[in-house]
Amino acid sequence: MTSTPDDAAVSAWVALARAYRLAFATFEARLKAESLPPMAWYDALWELEKAGEAGLRPFELEQAMLFEQYNLSRLVERLARAGLVERCACPEDRRGQVLSITAEGKSTRARMWRVYGEALAETIGGRLDDGELRLLAGLLRKLG
Amino acid sequence: MTSTPDDAAVSAWVALARAYRLAFATFEARLKAESLPPMAWYDALWELEKAGEAGLRPFELEQAMLFEQYNLSRLVERLARAGLVERCACPEDRRGQVLSITAEGKSTRARMWRVYGEALAETIGGRLDDGELRLLAGLLRKLG
DNA sequence: TCAAACTGGATGCAATTGCATCTAATAACA
DNA sequence: TGTTATTAGATGCAATTGCATCCAGTTTGA
């Protein structure tokens, strides 16, 4: 059973894609089952919550989330319409804005986390031990 | 720096999602740059090519690809319209059909692989050595 | 200091996805 | 055998995404 290094890369990619899609689909399904917003909302809210008072510029959020500009623009609009995020004119650059999470946004994120975090613990934490998880994370970060 | 097992699971998931999205976006971009169809087409064509003469039922392809039924139905329609896949009435079940890849489908898949495979070797194979790739694949398969 | 180039963000339109539901055929079972 | 439940696959409609392009403000540099 001699296999080229390339085979190893392909196998790793296939396993990566499968694991990601499976986990992602699970998380989305659990959130929907609880009538909660989708994962993308969570990611945006979490980045904004981490950013704190200072907030984030849309283009910063875009990079953090690996989102296309136009998709981020629309996501933010939905979040704002839902009252979870506030858009303020940016003092330093009149083209831009500063985004910050509202109190309602924080509470929605917290509610989502109860469901998402539990699913994550099951789907990921439940299948690998602590050492394996660290090893996995380390290897994956080399792909960034 | 004490961190709970949960933190390890979260970090692993974050790294997993990031690595997947980055690689996937790269592959899609490369294919598009060469005016080739998207990744989903590749996956479907490859599954059908592996299945050989016997072909696959749509629901089998659906499971293999982790696709929603309605999305698969439409993907197959596009592939058929593009002449890459053939749909034949299924002899054993008159509700169903059997899908098989055409000669043109095979050649399209091959052309895609030149681009996709190269990007994969760079993005994945180029960043981890053989042992790491095997280790990574093994860990990821435990998440399935 | 003014035009050209660039950056931040929005948007019209086409393609794709998600959801619910539908049709046709098979399986189950009273 | 005559329902009733399931399964395979398609589809109408609404929401989302991708693409191209636009507008407005900023930077560059002749």
Image: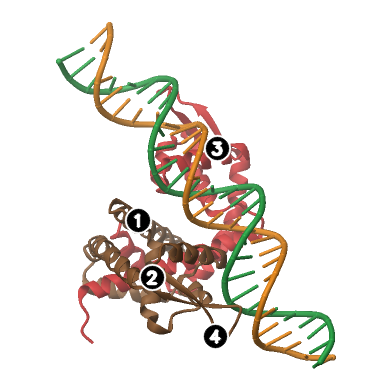
Chain colours: A red, B brown, C orange, D green
Marks 4 and 3, Cα distance to the nearest angstrom? Answer: 51 Å
As shown in the figure, which amino acid type bears the numbered disc 3? Glu
Q: Chain of mark 3?
A: A
Label 4 or label 2, whichever comes before in sequence order: 2
Does the rendering let one see residue A133?
no
As shown in the figure, which amino acid type bears the numbered disc 4? Pro
Disc 4 target residue: B91
Q: Is label 4 or label 2 in front?
A: 4
From the viewer's perspective, tell me whether residue A110 is left or right of residue C3: right
Q: Position of residue B28 (x, y in %)?
A: 35, 56
Q: Is label 4 or label 1 in front?
A: 4
Q: Provide the secondary structure element on which disc 1 rests.
A: helix
In this picture, is B104 found above or below A90? below
Please report the residue visible at 42 percent of the width from the left and 70 percent of the height from the top: B85
Please report the residue visible at 23 percent of the width from the left and 87 percent of the height from the top: A1
Please report the residue visible at 42 percent of the width from the left and 40 percent of the height from the top: A69
Marks 3 and 2, Cα distance to the nearest angstrom? Answer: 38 Å
Quadrant of residue A15 in the image? Answer: bottom left
Q: Chain of mark 1?
A: B
Disc 1 target residue: B28
Q: Position of residue A21 (x, y in %)?
A: 46, 65
Residue A77, numbered label: 3
Q: Is label 1 or label 3 in front?
A: 1
Q: Provide the secondary structure element on which disc 3 rests.
A: helix
Residue B45, numbered label: 2
Q: Position of residue A99 (x, y in %)?
A: 50, 34
Marks 1 and 3, Cα distance to the nearest angstrom? Answer: 26 Å
As shown in the figure, which amino acid type bears the numbered disc 1? Glu
